[in-house]
């Protein structure tokens, strides 16, 4: 007996086999041919709007699981709002500028790039973006995402670019836009400035060194116990490659410092609270504190750079901590954000003898042409050779890396264009706007508020190393912001 015929099963007009690989494209084609999206828009006219502002993907390659998940989740939100009675408009878009595209074009061109003008490279970047906009659009459609695919927003549309230029012009006219040589994150591999959002942190093992700077100015009048002694101020750093750019040593105005006799006619100056732990690190068991020092006594006194024939100024800075080191902070204004800020107060040069490939320039002498991270060992050896290296060890700490190439980055001063966060109260206005938004979940508000509250001036030029310098000015003829490479 055929038992199948004895079962009371419902009969359906559709196949029991899903056959999705064949049927899904057919269904998507029907939606497109019947202009389903346009009909929904027409039927929704007059309803309350729901608009999802889509943070766009880069047009730099095929979609992956991340971009697919992002777009599908957004599609779920838009469709659900449409179904509960809103006019849920979804306009997709693409980010067509920036390093993700330029980086891939660079790889395709290889050495040919050297023979091309900037205009030719930009044209190739535009063509590359156009290619992947079409590819990604079809891939998103294939996922069943519904939106205004025929009229997306593209950051490379000339109208979009004109709006950006116009807004930059407004910043220029109110004095917010300025050019400055300022230390920013710099990727030696991608050879570009990086924004804070493009930084990832990974654990790195770095050399940790203590270096002594001989005081040039005599302190014996203020501190008689130092008479006849060779007095050194001792710094600590985990970036030995920045020692050639040192211009100052910072001490905290409210800490107590000690003059420590370490024998051999030498005296070390360091934070009194750190004397014991530092002496253990130095391997010095016989020592004595011969005087306490008010840091204000040290302000603007001069020490000698251990490697070069120049002075390092002793300055006061509230950024100095007792968490690690000696309480005396090596200061290179061209290679650190806090160093730069305190350097401005004391009129220090923003000195950065490192080129766009992360190699030392001729100013550093011994180490010219060396890649900064490779030079760490050589700098330590030179310091040891001249007797300036007090101690060295390795330390594991969290270090910034480029989100794209995953390589460690450096702080490097380069001429860039910035928009001030404070001159026209941009920071204040942004923080006020944050509190006008309902955040779900609420911790999203804390994250973005803290980011804006503490962010430095906004670097908007992100000048590539192979690019020509750009001069921006207000043109009276066309009454807008213009620029020239001359």
Image (spheres, helix red, strand yellow):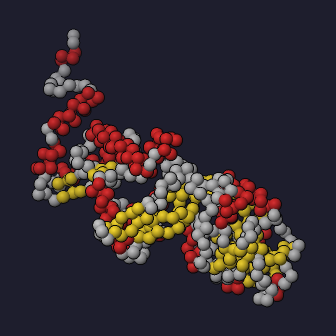
- Above-or-below relation of 420 to 160: below
Seen from the viewer's position, the closer of residues 148 and 143 is: 148
Extreme residue in the bottom direction: 221
Extreme residue in the right direction: 264
Q: Residue 413's spot in the image, x, y percent? A: 56, 64
Q: Residue at x 43, y 64 (%)?
A: 471
Q: Residue at x 47, y 60 (%)?
A: 469
73 vs 427, left or right, is left
Instruction: State which quarter of the image contains the N terminus.
Output: top left
Q: Residue 350's spot in the image, x, y percent? A: 58, 69
Seen from the viewer's position, the closer of residues 198 and 378 is: 378
Q: Residue 419's spot in the image, x, y percent? A: 42, 69
- Above-or-below relation of 82 to 185: above
Q: How many marks?
A: 0
**Residue 394, quarter of picture:** bottom right
Q: Residue at x 79, y 89 (%)?
A: 221
Question: Can residue 398 be seen at all in this image of the molecule?
Answer: no
**Residue 389, quarter of picture:** bottom right
Question: Can residue 177 be seen at all in this image of the molecule?
Answer: yes
Seen from the viewer's position, the closer of residues 466 and 140 is: 466
- Above-or-below relation of 105 to 221: above
Instruction: State which quarter of the image contains the C terminus.
Output: bottom left
370 vs 356, left or right, is right
312 vs 54, left or right, is right
Q: Residue 232's spot in the image, x, y percent? A: 78, 74
Q: Residue at x 74, y 73 (%)?
A: 304
């Amino acid at each position: 007996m055929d038992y199948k015929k004895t079962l009371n099963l419902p009969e359906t007009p559709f196949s029991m086999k899903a056959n999705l690989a064949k049927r899904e494209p057919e269904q998507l084609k029907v939606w497109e041919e019947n202009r389903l999206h346009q009909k929904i828009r027409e039927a929704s006219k007059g309803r309350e709007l729901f608009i999802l502002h889509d943070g766009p993907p880069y047009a730099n390659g095929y979609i992956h699981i991340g971009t697919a998940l992002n777009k599908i989740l957004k599609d779920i939100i838009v469709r659900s709002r449409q179904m509960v009675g809103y006019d849920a408009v979804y306009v997709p878009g693409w980010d067509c500028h920036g390093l993700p595209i330029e980086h891939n074009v660079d790889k395709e061109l290889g050495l040919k790039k050297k023979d091309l003008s900037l205009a030719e490279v930009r044209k190739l970047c535009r063509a590359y973006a156009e290619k992947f906009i079409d590819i990604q659009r079809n891939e998103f459609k294939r996922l069943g995402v519904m939106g205004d695919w025929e009229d997306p927003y593209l950051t490379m549309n000339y109208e979009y670019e004109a709006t950006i230029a116009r807004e930059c012009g407004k910043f220029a006219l109110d004095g917010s836009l300025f050019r400055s040589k300022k230390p920013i994150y710099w990727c030696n591999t991608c050879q570009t400035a990086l924004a804070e959002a493009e930084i990832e942190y990974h654990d790195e093992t770095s050399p940790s060194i203590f270096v002594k700077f001989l005081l040039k100015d005599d302190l014996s009048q203020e501190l008689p116990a130092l008479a006849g002694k060779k007095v050194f101020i001792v710094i600590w750093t985990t970036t030995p490659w920045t020692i050639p750019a040192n211009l100052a040593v910072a001490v905290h105005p409210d800490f107590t410092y000690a003059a420590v006799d370490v024998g051999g006619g030498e005296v070390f100056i360091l934070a009194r609270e750190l004397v014991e732990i530092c002496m253990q690190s130095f391997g010095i068991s016989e020592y004595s504190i011969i005087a306490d020092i008010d840091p204000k006594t040290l302000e603007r006194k001069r020490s000698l750079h251990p490697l070069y024939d120049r002075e390092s100024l002793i300055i006061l800075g509230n950024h100095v901590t007792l968490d690690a080191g000696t309480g005396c902070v090596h200061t290179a204004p061209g290679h650190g954000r806090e160093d730069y800020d305190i350097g401005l107060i004391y009129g220090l040069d923003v000195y950065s003898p490192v080129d766009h490939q992360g190699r030392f320039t001729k100013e550093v002498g011994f180490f010219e042409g060396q890649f900064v991270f490779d030079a760490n060992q050589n700098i330590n050896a030179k310091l040891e050779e001249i007797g300036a290296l007090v101690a060295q060890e390795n330390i594991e700490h969290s270090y910034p890396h480029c989100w794209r190439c995953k390589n460690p980055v450096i702080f490097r001063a380069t001429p860039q264009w910035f928009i001030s966060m404070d001159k026209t109260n941009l920071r204040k206005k942004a923080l006020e706007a944050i509190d006008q938004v309902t955040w779900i979940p609420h911790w999203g508000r804390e994250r973005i508020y803290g980011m804006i509250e503490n962010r430095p001036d906004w670097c908007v030029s992100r000048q590539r190393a192979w690019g020509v310098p750009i001069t921006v000015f207000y043109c009276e003829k066309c009454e807008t912001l213009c620029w020239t490479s001359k």
